[in-house]
Amino acid sequence: MKLQIGGSPCTKWSIAQTKNRETEPEGIGWELFENYLIALEKFKPDFFLYENNKSMAPAIRAQITRELGVEPILINSGLVSAQNRQRLYWTNIPGVEQPEDLGILLRDILESGVCWREKAYTLMAGHARSVVNAIARNGKFPFNGAAEPVRIGTIESAAESKNFNSRPYRVYSPDGKSVTLSSTDGGTGSTTGLYAAPVRVGDMPNASGEVSGSQSGRIYSVDGKGVPIQARPNGGGADGAATGLYAVPAGMAWRGRGESSSYEMRDDQKANSVTAAGHQSRLVIEAADGKTYPVYEVRDGQITIKGKQYHIKLADGFYIIRKLTVTECKRLQTVPEEYIFPVSDTQAYKMLGNGWTVDVIAHILHYAPGITEEPLEVLSMYDGMSCGHLALDKLGAHIAHYYATEIDKYAVQTTQHNFPDTIQLGDAFQVRDDGWSLPGLAMEETVAEPAEEVMEETEQDGGHVAAPSIIIERTRECVLSLSYGKDSLACLGAIEELGWPLDRIIHAEVWATDTIPADLPPMMEFKAKADAIIKERWGIEVEHVRSQYSYESRFYKLCGGKNEKYRGEITGFPGVIRNWCNSELKVNPMNKAKKNCISYMGIAADEPNRFHNLTDTKKSPLVAAGWIEEQCRIWCEKNGLLSPIYTSSARGGCWFCHYQGVKQLRLLRKNYPEYWKLLLKWDVDSIRTFRSDGHTVHDFEKRFQLEDQGFISPDDKIFRWSMLEEPLNFRIF
């Protein structure tokens, strides 16, 4: 199967382009899109997917629609992530619908801190260096950021005071971890409370060389590396002023006074005694990552920045305002955390901003018939960091070759680090060359000719299906690939009707452990029943082939390879980048069992988008007989071969699958507690989370426990994962 994906750079089309914005289908922006069209004509993919910004001018949108021959689909990434990101998608993949709203909020993806909105703004390639400066410059909160609360508790000695928990007794820290409290702050904290000061490491001599032991001469350090601090009262004696004591890193010096005051780098990069400033926005603290941040007070829903007040949705208190981390931006784009950026954070932000929301792409592509069944030849135009590859890996697709056009050296470097087999093609404008082709891939369309073929018109349910009637000559062994779904089982009836030869029937069996199958008991019972019917009627015993690994044994296999992060660790749950379960447990053993044969596939006659999979060695009895999907179901039902997945809530596939929905996981826990217990054990041992969005099996367990206790309803459509971290103060059902 051939697949072409891509989204040409939208810089010239975006509404954010204030100068020389293109509003007609001409100019450099349109030339970039034309490269995609030219590649489409030369590559001749079975399916294509083109993406771009919805803010483009109507004339450009209309012309793209005319050129591609399909209407665009508007999808907001906010349905599957914590980011409001509306994009247009043009595709010939049939039946694409809107993704289910997963209810993921910005707070769900933060490593720490709180947010002032429910959803992030669209992640930009030019990620703001300073959220605070952006706020002050624009007078609003246009950038993605988080607030780190610095309060860590209340002074215990005040427990019996009527003022217990009042502001003067509150203690704050930049990273939420308790550090040694060493300030006495005159008047028991004044009005702002106490601040956790660095660990005291000694005393500093005065100008005469004497050590007085007074507070102004004490030496403090945040990490034991000797960052000195000096408290100079702001009119309050030697008691640390009204704001407490703060540490700044070595090499920072206090310059000036008042609104013009600031911390500046010393030329000699040495430690310098500093004075704690009285102006709130000038208070500097050092976080656990070694970075310094100013502390801002939120009062009555207002925050003061550089002398101006702005509205913000935060509770009263003291905060560090920061931009989102690279990890948090990965989560916004649903990029797996194991994806590695071997470049600077600046370049990582840029690539993430230019990239796709992976789960949106995976959602669209999963509608492509046969996407996980046949090897894929993929051409990715303007590939960037290969989000298309990530999406296909998440689906469990088998990528034979992945070709990429990309000119950004950092994007290419990042792609090759994560996907070293990617074939880089360079500049997309090369597709305009007469001799352009993909290395190792024939560019001309070829059609395999069968031994004998007659096209006949078959009437079905008032419509007509063109069904090729093929006579199979016994030149090779004829093998049916059986999944126990209705279409593959109905192939038996179609083969019988056509009089085609049938030598073997093969099924790839997956096992959870050496003794526990991957199928739930109802499906195992059905398979045994179907095998008996097949043997009695067709005289063939179904071959159940299996991998050398069970899921568990492959789960605990030690990692090798180039990635030092995981080398020597157990494999754990399948990751988005390395989705090993489908290929190693099903595809590989099936391919080993079918060599040099004619393979029968369960493609129905009303699935024309899958006809391209049929070759001289891959035949569909259903297409040849003109059987549509509904006929397959009816035939299976009449012959006692209809799987329980079509008549009950039983699930087809592996009970431990990380792609299954919350309803199926809930049923697994309820009906098969021994399997659920095993899944919880694997969850503890795995180096990767169960879900690519970061959720674990234990997260689901906690959710289900709250359901059992009546704190949340299984049918509650407003469920948020952040509710698991909140006090149990939401409504009882």
Image (cartoon, rainbow, N blue to C red):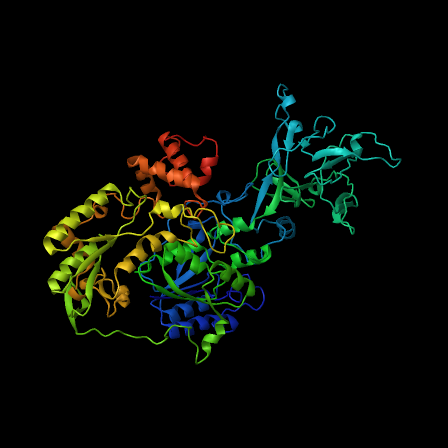
Residue 497 placement, left or right of 150: left
Q: Where residue 225 sits in the image (x, y, percent)?
A: 71, 41
- The answer to whether one can see residue 243 in this image is no
Furthest-right residue in view?
Answer: 208
Residue 199 placement, left or right of 607: right
Task: Say which of 254 and 371 sits in front.
Answer: 371
Q: Where residue 147 sits in the image (x, y, percent)?
A: 58, 42
Q: Quadrant of the N terminus?
A: bottom left
Task: Say which of 353 and 61 sits in front.
Answer: 353
Q: Quadrant of the C terminus?
A: top left
Q: Where residue 240 sits in the image (x, y, percent)?
A: 75, 32
Task: Say which of 80 and 471 sits in front.
Answer: 471
Residue 646 placement, left or right of 51: left
Q: Residue at x 27, y 74 (%)?
A: 447
Residue 128 placement, left or right of 566: right
- The answer to whether one can see residue 464 in this image is yes
Q: How many numbered dots are placed on residues in this image?
A: 0
Q: For residue 179, what is the image quadrant?
A: top right
